[in-house]
Amino acid sequence: MTAAEATFRRLDAHDLPDLLELERSCFSCPWDERQYALAFEQRICHVFGLFVPGDQIIPGVGGLREHLVAYATVYILPPEMEILNIAVADSVRRQGYGTRLLRLVLQIAAKMGIQRTFLEVRKNNVAAHALYRSAGFETVGVRSGYYPDTGEDALLMRLDMDAGYAEIDPAKRDMDQGDDIE
């Protein structure tokens, strides 16, 4: 299965076990169940994910159960959006899942009239820098000692949706019908 074939949808509290499992596998300071439960209650916080059939990722598991392989947590407060995190399962990294997820989230933001999107990223996370730059994000600042686990700096990145979003290849704007968040 390719990234383009993965199912995209908004997550809710029913997805919490899978979300927490992927969160723990991707981040050294993961959000916990309480933090995500509170996030799901907030109207400004949204979590979007990509899912694949169970037998596509874990050989021998099979069945109809889908697996969460990537997700993005965002705050949407027009005219701005903040991307809190994007996570992609190790088993599907470097296969386009992160790129597709980011593009779909940006399409939702564009439909909502978002003008600017912000995020922080670890200074040494070269793969994430490449992903964000490919979508038009630019580094606009540094937050010294931002990450508590290592004291690593964070780069503050911004995407001007008028300029940056237009740079994404229009042929790859594959927004599925019915992906509105409300």
Image (cartoon, rainbow, N blue to C red):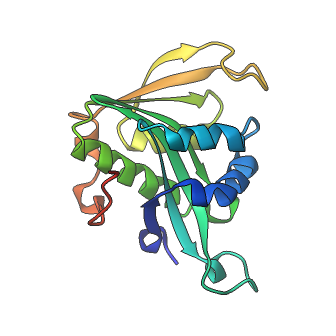
**117, 170: nearer the viewer:** 117
The number of numbered badges drawn on the structure is 0
Residue 31 visible, this orientation: no
**46, 120: nearer the viewer:** 46
Q: Which residue is drawn at 51% across and 54% down?
A: 98
Q: Residue furthest top?
A: 144
Q: Position of residue 160 (x, y in %)?
A: 28, 30
81, above or below 48, in the image:
above
Q: Position of residue 169 (x, y in %)?
A: 27, 54
Residue 156 visible, this orientation: yes
150, above or below 36, in the image:
above
Q: Position of residue 38 (x, y in %)?
A: 59, 38
Q: Position of residue 153 (x, y in %)?
A: 65, 19
Quadrant of res 121:
top right
Q: Residue at x 30, y 42 (%)?
A: 109
Q: Which residue is drawn at 79% across and 26% down?
A: 149
Q: In this view, does 25 lie to the left or right of 49?
A: right
71, above or below 73, in the image:
below
Q: In this view, does 9 lie to the left or right of 93?
A: left
Q: Residue at x 30, y 66 (%)?
A: 176
67, above or below 36, in the image:
below
Q: Is residue 10 left or right of residue 21?
A: left
Quadrant of res 61:
bottom right
